Amino acid sequence: MDFKFHLNSRSLRDKLTLIIGLTGVIIVVLAGAGIVTYQTIVSLRTLEDELASNAHLIGYRIALMMDRAEPTDLGDALSLPYNNEHLRWVSFRSADGDYVFSQSIESATPRDAQFEVEDHMEFINGEAVVHCRIIKDGRYYGFLSLASSLYPLWHSIFTGLLISLGIVGVCLITAQRLSSRLLDFILIPVRQLADTASRITRSGNYSLRAIKNSNDELGQLTEDFNHMLAHIEAREAELEHARQELESKVKLLHEEQEQLRKAQIRERRLQQRLVIAQRLESQNLRTAKEQAETSSSAKSEFLASMSHEIRTPMNGIMGFASLLRETELDEEQLELAEIIHSSANNLLTLLNDLLDFSKIEAGRIELDFSPFDLKSLLHEVESIFQHEIARKDLDLRIIISPRTPHTVVTDASRLRQVLFNLAGNAIKFTEAGSVEIHVDATPVSSIELLCEYSLSIEVRDTGIGIAENNQTRIFNSFTQVDASATKRFGGAGLGLAITKRLTEMLGGEIGVRSTLGQGSNFFVTIPIRAAAPSLETSLEKPVTLAGRPLKALVAEDSPVSQKLISALLHRRGHRCNVVDCGEELLRAFSPGDFDLIIADVHMPDMDGLTAVARIRKRESMADRTGFIPAYIIVITADAVGSTRQQALDAGADEYMNKPMVNEQFYALIQKAQEHFERSPTQ
């Protein structure tokens, strides 16, 4: 680490000089080592060649003496003078091993020659020993070992080493001198580049540029350095411009913050004023809302009260007029009775239209989508208008397509009202001919077990018709085709407006096709669903006198209504007891004593709904053996639609609005008779 730190602190010249010197030394040392190695190898081969030459020469002499059979002279052959002064000893062993001779030089210790496989040289005890076989003319004479000192080898190696060291020294001196001069070509541009960078650092002036002295890498570095300075200079200019803009924006931001602070102060003051104003406005709105709710509640109570007060006497007028028409009257008396009934019916229609229109405008119409028998509803409409059809000698036909389902799901009461209005208008504006009600159901889609249908109802008449330019106006509120129609046929112009609103609430559409003087065709399409038929018997058959007489208990506080209901029951052969309130109804009732109970909703002391609920409770607690629970019909003059559901929840079987239409009342009585016919005595 110290060497590395020391090296890093040196100048570039010193580093390059050291690198070049070390590189040169390594190269020269490697070269010298190569030379010494080569010299050593050459010296070894030379020594081996000299020893082998002397060994072959001595062996040749030995072979000649052995050929002349002079083995005793072998020692003379070994003692002959050598041509190499460094020979140490020689040893010979004959091929058969009988003769062994050795001779040493300079007090060396010879070794006995051994049989070897091949000629070779080895080093033994600091001596070079050559072993060779003596073969002459293909005859093998023995084996000769000749030894020499290693002085010639060491001398040759030492000489080569001295030469290498000399070359290394010369090379180092030469490299140092040359590198010292040649480094200036590299270091001068680098030093200039460093000086330029240093001046830029001290002055911060990025407009200075380095001088390019060559086209090599240093020249490219200098050029790139100058380009970098140019970019930095441009960036500095941009930063300076951005700094000035930022200072300007900061100053502007401070001004805007000051303005915002002032605006916030003004806003808080305005909010405080607004809160005060909102509180005052909220208080005013609450007061107005309370007043509106009070007014709406008062209006609803007024409508309900007026409906009750008007419908109750209307119930007597219409009921007794119907009864009067059923008695034996002369022509003038019958005409007067018809006028009374027609006037009362017109007044009731006007009252219903006004009440319905008021509820529609107030958004208080509630829909009840439940299954009902469509054909029963149509026959009910037919029975309502039977007397008017007979009076005007018209032909009323109801045509139902075979694919129309019997039991459908929609709001039965609203659909009934639509049919009443359309059929009533058709009968009212038709003096002669016919009125037809065509009913068809087109399948739309299937959802699990219930089928979606589009119910199409067309009411066709042969009446006065409607001019084309008036057909778009007749569905407006308080609108008649012309003033003469109002004078001639009467009406407030609300029927079709209410019918259109009800049709749209049921999700359908209404329209008209008509030709003046040729009749009209009102058509309605309403989405419905088919449902499983009800177990209850529908009102498909006309009202008859079938069934056993019933024993009825009537609870009604109005003497007129008491007399009317009693008369209607007696006309059909039924017996009845009459009480004035709910308390008397409970006192008079005992499970199994009465078949039919007819109770008004509004009575003193206890209302009819409470009395009905208590009757059902009393029946549930009594012994059911031997009697059938009473069939309960609730009647009311209310205009509130929720009364029907309240009556059914209390335990009533049927519900009927005043004024009662005799045919509808008889239909409910017949349902009660059929109920007892189906129910076995328990």
Image (tube, rainbow, N blue to C red):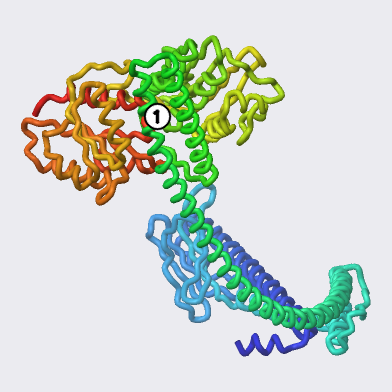
Pick the residue in front: 558 or 56: 558
- Please indicate, yes or no, whether residue 573 appears anywhere in the rendered image: yes
Q: Quadrant of the N terminus?
A: bottom right
| Residue 114 x, y percent position in the rendering | 41, 62
Quarter of the view holding residue 10 = bottom right
- Which residue is at a point 68% across and 90% down the rendered structure image? 6
- Which residue is at a point 67% across and 70% down the rendered structure image? 34
Quarter of the view holding residue 522 = top right
| Residue 301 x, y percent position in the rendering | 44, 51
What secondary structure is found at the residue carrying circle 1?
helix
Pick the residue in front: 453 or 71: 453
Q: Quadrant of the C terminus?
A: top left
The correct choice, above or below, for 334 with respect to 625 in the image is above
Judged left or right of residue 362, residue 643 is left
The correct choice, above or below, for 490 with respect to 57 in the image is above
| Residue 492 x, y percent position in the rendering | 58, 33
Q: Which residue is mark 1?
A: 318
Judged left or right of residue 493, residue 439 is left
The correct choice, above or below, for 47 with respect to 155 in the image is above
Total count of labels: 1
Graded by Cα atoms within 10 Å as few (under 14), some (14 to 19) or many (20 or more), the crowding at tag 1 reads many
- Which residue is at a point 23% across and 45% down the rendered structure image? 582
- For badge 1, the amino acid type reads Met
Pick the residue in front: 39 or 268: 268
- Please indicate, yes or no, whether residue 173 appears anywhere in the rendered image: no
